[in-house]
Image: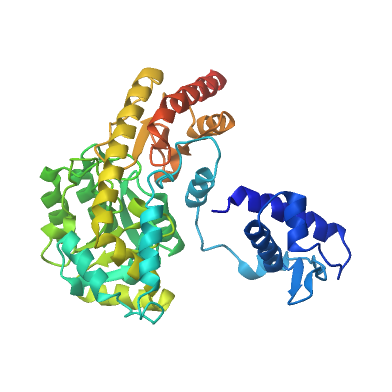
């Protein structure tokens, strides 16, 4: 197997040769480069392929590899675009921060995706190999998704396959659902704190997010009734299972009341069930809200991305009635369909023993990481408060009075710990500052050291306040 770092090193050396040589100059042979750089032929070929793709080199069969003509970079004034574009309709605040944190080196308490030790990389490699060999692998699929995958989602979520729409992950599904249900300018209720990606979608669609606070038992029904009365909203967005960022679970005693309140308001419910398969080992999650709904009121969105790998962008929308037709039509307008090889890969994985093995290994690891994080926070950050998670990958840490989340996050990053400021998960003013800590991307044995550094960052930030 070729080491990526070796390819990077050889590619860097070839770039230096290409930039310092003359246009049309021939590079040394592959064998000469092997001897010069101390690597194998496959490494050299992969590095050469990179530079050909970059346009720095050109290969001529039978003649060799040559430095290509350099294209001059044209630098012009683009200020006119500010006038032409006008105010931006795109609101990505919070989402971009999440991805930046995920790419940060050091202790990773900011990433919401599983680290390499938990991802299903090997299982997916085997699945995609089998999927690519299917006779119809590269044909266009039905726009609603492959029947086999729709059936699997239906069985898993207690839905008729006819009411399942396969999507490219949950983010696109949220966008299609929001725009299909509400025109721009309309209010939409969010159980808060909430996922920044959903807020970004709503704001970019011209909708007006309105907060409905929750507690450790999920959204508070009395506040939900008041929000509907004041706003006349027709849509509630909720994460009833292991909510991002606070890990809350909607209490069984509240489920019927929440649905009845939405029914009385004539409102739809988008159930963002992103953590459906991120429960702890031996602790089954509650059923989807859609199983308590016989009126087509609840639209459930799930994804395989979190439990398997970030690049497996496969999810589903569960909906009934005219609203499904609208969402399906919006999906066609946006991107036609989900790649058939990706759907086949998902089918190959979830329909075999690899699926149960992935659930077991991830569930056990998440339970261990959560237990370790709770113990470390209790020991090293006694002035902060939080609710211990019952599943999922997040803890929402409440900071002491007067301490700013941005300052703590900045100090933590300086010390090599990635965390996310809580303000991106909220709407409007907050009584206290928070940090979202995710244990998806950090091994259990690394957590105590990361929390000790976070405690140091908090002391520094608190000292500045004083």
Q: Position of residue 90 (x, y in %)?
A: 51, 61
Residue at x 82% of width, y 57% of height: 17
Residue at x 37% of width, y 49% of height: 195
Which quarter of the picture shows residue 438? top left
Residue at x 73% of width, y 64% of height: 79
Residue at x 35% of width, y 76% of height: 134
- Residue 16 shows in this picture: yes
Q: Position of residue 80 (x, y in %)?
A: 72, 68
The residue closer to the viewer here, 30 or 341, is 30
- Residue 233 shows in this picture: no
Q: Residue furthest right?
A: 22
Q: Tell me: 410 left or right of 199.
A: right
Q: How many marks?
A: 0
Which quarter of the picture shows residue 344? bottom left
Q: Tell me: 361 left or right of 112.
A: left
Q: Position of residue 19 (x, y in %)?
A: 83, 59
Q: Position of residue 200 (x, y in %)?
A: 44, 56
Q: Tell me: 18 left or right of 208.
A: right
The residue closer to the viewer here, 81 or 7, is 7
Relative to 389, does residue 158 appear above or below in the rendering?
below
Relative to 279, does residue 1 appear above or below in the rendering?
below
Q: State the scheme by which the image is colored.
A: rainbow
């Amino acid at each position: 197997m070729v080491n990526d770092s070796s390819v990077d090193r050889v590619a860097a050396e070839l770039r230096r040769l290409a930039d310092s040589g003359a246009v049309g100059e021939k590079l040394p042979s592959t064998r000469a480069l092997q001897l010069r750089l101390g690597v194998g032929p496959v490494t050299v070929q992969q590095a050469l392929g990179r530079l050909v793709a970059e346009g720095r080199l050109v290969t001529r069969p039978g003649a060799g590899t040559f430095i290509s003509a350099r294209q001059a970079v044209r630098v012009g004034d683009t200020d006119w675009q500010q006038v032409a574009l006008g105010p931006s309709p795109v609101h990505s605040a919070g989402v971009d921060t999440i991805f930046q944190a995920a790419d940060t080196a050091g202790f990773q308490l900011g990433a919401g995706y599983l680290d390499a030790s938990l991802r299903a990389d090997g299982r997916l490699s085997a699945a995609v190999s089998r999927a690519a060999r299917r006779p119809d692998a590269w044909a266009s699929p039905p726009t609603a998704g492959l029947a086999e995958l729709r059936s699997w989602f239906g069985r898993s979520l207690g839905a008729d396959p006819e009411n399942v729409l396969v999507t490219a992950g949950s983010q696109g599904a949220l966008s299609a659902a929001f725009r299909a249900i509400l025109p721009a300018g309309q209010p939409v209720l969010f159980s808060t704190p909430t996922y920044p990606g959903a807020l970004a979608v709503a704001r970019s669609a011209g909708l007006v997010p309105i907060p409905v606070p929750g507690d450790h038992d999920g959204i508070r029904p009395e506040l939900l009734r008041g929000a509907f009365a004041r706003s006349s909203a027709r849509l509630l967005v909720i994460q009833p299972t292991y909510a991002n960022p606070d890990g809350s679970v909607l209490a069984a005693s509240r489920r019927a009341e929440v649905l009845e309140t939405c029914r009385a308001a004539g409102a739809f419910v988008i159930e963002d069930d992103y953590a459906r398969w991120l429960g702890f080992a031996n602790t089954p999650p509650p059923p989807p809200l859609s199983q308590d709904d016989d009126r087509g009121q609840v639209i459930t969105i799930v994804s395989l991305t979190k439990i398997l790998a970030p690049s497996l962008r496969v999810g589903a929308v569960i909906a009934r009635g005219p609203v499904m037709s609208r969402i399906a039509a919006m999906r066609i307008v946006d991107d036609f369909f989900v790649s058939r090889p990706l759907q086949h890969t998902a089918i190959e994985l979830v329909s075999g023993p690899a699926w149960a093995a992935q659930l077991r290994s991830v569930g056990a690891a998440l339970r261990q990481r959560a237990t370790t994080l709770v113990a470390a926070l209790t020991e090293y950050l006694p002035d902060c408060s939080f609710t211990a998670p019952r599943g999922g990958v997040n803890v929402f840490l409440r900071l002491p009075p007067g301490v700013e989340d941005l300052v703590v996050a900045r100090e933590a990053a300086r010390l090599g710990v990635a965390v996310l400021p809580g303000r991106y998960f909220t709407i409007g003013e907050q009584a206290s500052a928070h940090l979202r800590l995710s244990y998806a991307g950090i091994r259990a044995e690394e957590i105590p050291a990361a929390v000790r550094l976070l405690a140091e960052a908090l002391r520094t930030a608190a000292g500045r306040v004083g």
